């Protein structure tokens, strides 16, 4: 039995539910133990010193379901909601166990990891390594994947949501581009691992195609009883929102484009001294008035850039120098916006 506290939405209210992952005879599924209301900490009763116990509602829920509760597992589930001092004490006494993946050998890990979905592997790889280029994740055993093993779909989403909190706004699109393996749609493009430099409308279309395909994937939703493949599940709705609410990272577009063109395209040019653009010059390059640019959100600027970039992209017959100049201007303006905020 694997216990965890899942945050849920009830209309406009946030509620928390103590759940467990369990083997139902054919797969791992999730079931509710007790509704904790809006604050799990209310179910922790302190008795002085470092002592505490859990409320009668929690104890009665286990008894009512005929489940034998493990004190250490319950403490781990409530760990984030404990008094900070007591939490540190517990972490010191459970070092090497709480919050860590199982210590299986390679053969055992391979046995448990065989049930993991490719989407989960790609998500965790990006969160662990931060790279769009994943190489081959299949057919190999990766220790960092053990944290997802022997869990229900609901608990896997719970674990990954906690890890996703480290993502910065500009990383969300790269994350989803990688997790959905959108690179496969650009096999012959030299910049297939640099989504900011690809045709934005094509990337958007492939994203929607893959998110819909995943929504109909029975293997991904194994153990989830209430899923209708014709309606996008809440597990995936958040990704559509995060994808269209953010832009691809502009931080190194210029450097990546320059390196890839030098490496993969054969053309001769006389390298010029690289000079930084002023805000006014960058605006002019993207066809914007400074006042118009300052009123734009980062998302609106990204959409404007993608429209321009599509027209001048070398893979679509555009001029490579113009495309590079557009990318440089976009990087400059995004940097200016970040500095202002």
Image (cartoon, helix red, strand yellow):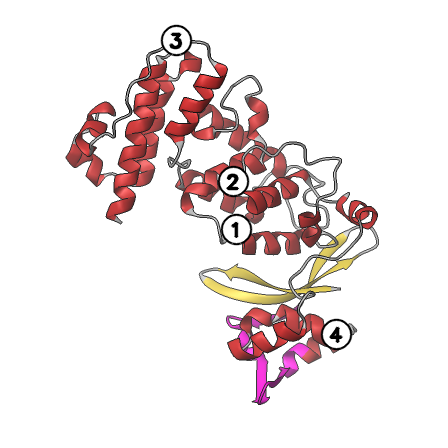
Q: Is residue 7 left or right of residue 146?
A: left
For residue 175, the mark is 2
Is residue 93 depicted above or below 204 in this figure? below
One can see residue 47 in this view: yes
In the rendering, at what x and y percent does residue 246 appear? 40, 40
* Pointer 3 with pointer 4, Cβ within 8 A: no
Asked if the residues shown at circle 2 and circle 1 are in contact, with their CB atoms under 8 angstroms apart, the answer is yes
Percent x, y for residue 242?
45, 44
Q: Is residue 43 magenta?
A: yes
- Residues at marks 2 and 4, CA–CA distance in whole angstroms: 37 Å
Residue at the spot of label 1: 164
Quadrant location of residue 50? bottom right
**Residue highlighted by disc 3:** 268
C-alpha separation, residue under disc 4 versus residue under disc 1: 29 Å
Residue drawn at point x = 68 percent, y = 54 percent = 147
Query: How much space separates mark 3 and mark 4, taking CA atoms?
Result: 71 Å
Q: What is the span of residues highlighted in magenta in the rendered image?
A: 32-58
Closer to the camera: disc 3 or disc 2?
A: 3
Q: Earlier in the sequence, mark 1 or mark 3?
A: 1
Q: Of the residues tagged 1 and 3, which is closer to the observer?
A: 3
Instruction: Evaluate if marks 4 and 1 touch, with contact meaning CB atoms under 8 Å apart.
Output: no
Residue at position x 46%, y 64% from top?
Answer: 13
Mark 4 or 1, which is nearer the eye?
1
226 or 312: which is nearer to us?
Answer: 312
Q: Earlier in the sequence, mark 3 or mark 2?
A: 2
Query: Is the residue marked by circle 2 packed among few (<14), some (14-19), or many (20+) residues within 10 Å?
Result: many
Residue picked out by circle 4:
69
Spatial separation of the CA atoms under disc 3 and disc 2:
35 Å
- Which badge, 4 or 1, is on the more N-terminal residue? 4
Farthest residue, direction bottom: 48
């Amino acid at each position: 039995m694997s216990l965890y506290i899942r945050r849920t939405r009830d209309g406009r209210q946030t509620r928390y539910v103590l759940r467990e992952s369990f083997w139902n005879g054919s797969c791992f599924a999730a079931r509710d133990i007790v509704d904790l209301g809006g604050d799990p900490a209310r179910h922790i009763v302190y008795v002085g010193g470092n002592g505490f116990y859990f409320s009668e509602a929690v104890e009665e829920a286990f008894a009512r379901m005929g489940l034998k509760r493990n004190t250490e597992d319950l403490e781990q589930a409530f760990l984030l909601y404990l008094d900070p001092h007591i939490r540190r004490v517990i972490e010191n006494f459970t070092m090497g166990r709480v919050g860590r993946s199982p210590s299986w050998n390679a053969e055992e890990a391979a046995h448990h990891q065989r049930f993991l979905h490719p989407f989960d592997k790609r998500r965790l790889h990006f969160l662990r390594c931060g790279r769009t280029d994943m190489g081959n994740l299949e057919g190999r055993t990766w220790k960092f994947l053990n944290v997802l093993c022997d869990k229900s779909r609901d608990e896997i989403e719970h674990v990954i949501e906690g890890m996703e909190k480290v993502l910065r706004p500009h990383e969300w699109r790269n994350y989803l581009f990688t997790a959905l393996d959108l690179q496969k749609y650009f096999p012959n493009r030299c910049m297939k691992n640099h989504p900011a430099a690809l045709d934005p409308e094509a990337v958007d279309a492939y994203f929607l195609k893959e998110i819909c395909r995943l929504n109909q994937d029975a293997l991904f939703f194994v153990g989830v009883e209430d899923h209708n493949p014709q309606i996008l599940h809440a597990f995936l709705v958040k990704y559509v929102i995060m994808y269209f609410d953010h832009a691809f990272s502009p931080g190194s577009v210029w450097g990546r484009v320059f390196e890839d063109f030098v490496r993969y395209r054969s053309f001769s040019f006389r390298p010029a001294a690289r000079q930084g653009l002023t805000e006014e010059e960058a605006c002019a390059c993207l066809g914007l008035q400074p006042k118009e640019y300052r009123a734009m959100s980062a998302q609106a600027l990204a959409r404007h850039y993608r429209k321009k970039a599509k027209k001048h992209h070398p893979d679509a017959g555009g001029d490579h120098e113009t495309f590079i100049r557009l990318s440089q201007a976009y990087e400059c303006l995004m940097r200016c916006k970040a500095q202002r905020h």
